[in-house]
Image: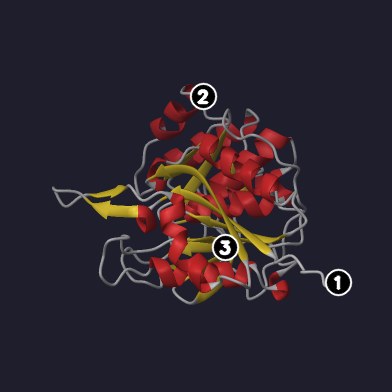
Amino acid sequence: MTTTQALPKVVVLTTGGTISCTTDQNGALIPTVDGATLVAPVAERFAGNLNIEVRELTRLDSAAMTFADIDEIVAACHSALKDPAVTGVVVTHGTDSMEETAIALDTFHADSRPIVLTGSQKPHDHPESDGFTNLFEAVMIASDTSARDIGVLIVFGHAVLPARGATKWHTTDELAFATNAPEEPPRADLVPATPLADTRVDIIHAYPGAPRTLIDAALAAGAQGLVIEAMGSGNVGTEIGVALGDALDNGIPVVITTRVPRGDVSGTYGGAGGGATLAAKGAIGSTYFRAGQSRVLLAIAIASGVSPFTLF
């Protein structure tokens, strides 16, 4: 009597994005391709070696993603990993906000098995779409035991990047993502999954001469925390600096990041808007994280009650 060993399984969660888009009669891209159709050609390539289970969550342009949508993706990933036959999870996602969802998943991910995000720059119906290759490589990484214990990954354009520090660096190039993180970015202490839907963190761009009304309006509208996209290594103008000092005095957490593509944020300059002045008042330097991921990390800290310093 012979026994057949069960094949390993990868769960693919589909959420929309360019990878699921087709072009309508006006030339606009619309996410129309269902999960089963999207994954079918890749599943054929792995037939007999790997089971691929598809779970369609939504079909969204990722610019429309909210914290509630991220909550759903986090819950779906954790649900998929309850099955011991699953070797990893792949999430297809639009590129516009992939880095935000990736950092949320990574911060909540306590399992050794990988979660891999991927998508495409060209739509499903483009004759040279990069969707198939990206999805194929994402499934391959998710099924590889060597990808364990390193957290959440973005697999895109033949690159494999840790979630922490990843950022979309080009609007159209097939190598869509780069990283500002060190080669092996240390992972923060993991946080139990916490819903983010009711948490509001605003990003404010601190351009030269920006008025304090930007800060005051955000707080009046209900912002529970602020991410400031500062200049240089973490500096803002005088008006914004005074307003941030007031916010910090009132217990509002503030993270200072930068509009500069590369390098860490460090508080070295004095003056009302200098990074050193803000750091002395309790502002948190984002290190290598840029505004999108900083907002998610601060929201996780607020929602879960952990110190935001521990996540940066």
Q: Which mark is residue 165?
A: 3
Disc 3 marks a residue whose amino acid type is Gly
From this viewpoint, is residue 179 visible?
no
Looking at the rendered structure, the secondary structure element under dot 1 is: loop
Considering only order in the chain, which callout, 2 or 3, is on the residue closer to the N terminus? 3
Residue 238: x %, y % from top left: 44, 43
Tell me the residue that label 2 is attached to: 222
Q: Is residue 69 above or below residue 31?
A: above
Disc 1 marks a residue whose amino acid type is Met
From this viewpoint, is residue 302 visible?
yes
Tell me the residue that label 1 is attached to: 1
Considering only order in the chain, which callout, 2 or 1, is on the residue closer to the N terminus? 1
Quadrant where the N terminus lies? bottom right
Q: Mark 1 and 2 residues: CB-CB less than 8 Å, in contact? A: no
Comparing labels 1 and 2, the label whose residue is closer to the camera: 1
Left/right placement of residue 124 relative to residue 77 reads left
Residue 8: x %, y % from top left: 70, 65
Distance between mark 3 and mark 2 Cα atoms: 28 Å
Label 1 Cα crowd, 10 Å radius (few <14 / some 14-19 / many 20+): few
| Residue situated in front as seen by the camera: 19 or 164 | 19
Label 2 Cα crowd, 10 Å radius (few <14 / some 14-19 / many 20+): few
Looking at the rendered structure, the secondary structure element under dot 2 is: loop
Residue 213: x %, y % from top left: 39, 30
Considering only order in the chain, which callout, 1 or 3, is on the residue closer to the N terminus? 1
Comparing labels 3 and 1, the label whose residue is closer to the camera: 1
Quadrant where the C terminus lies? bottom right
Looking at the rendered structure, the secondary structure element under dot 3 is: loop
Left/right placement of residue 180 relative to residue 63 reads right
| Residue situated in front as seen by the camera: 120 or 185 | 120
Q: Mark 3 and 2 residues: CB-CB less than 8 Å, in contact? A: no
Distance between mark 3 and mark 1 Cα atoms: 52 Å
Disc 2 marks a residue whose amino acid type is Gly
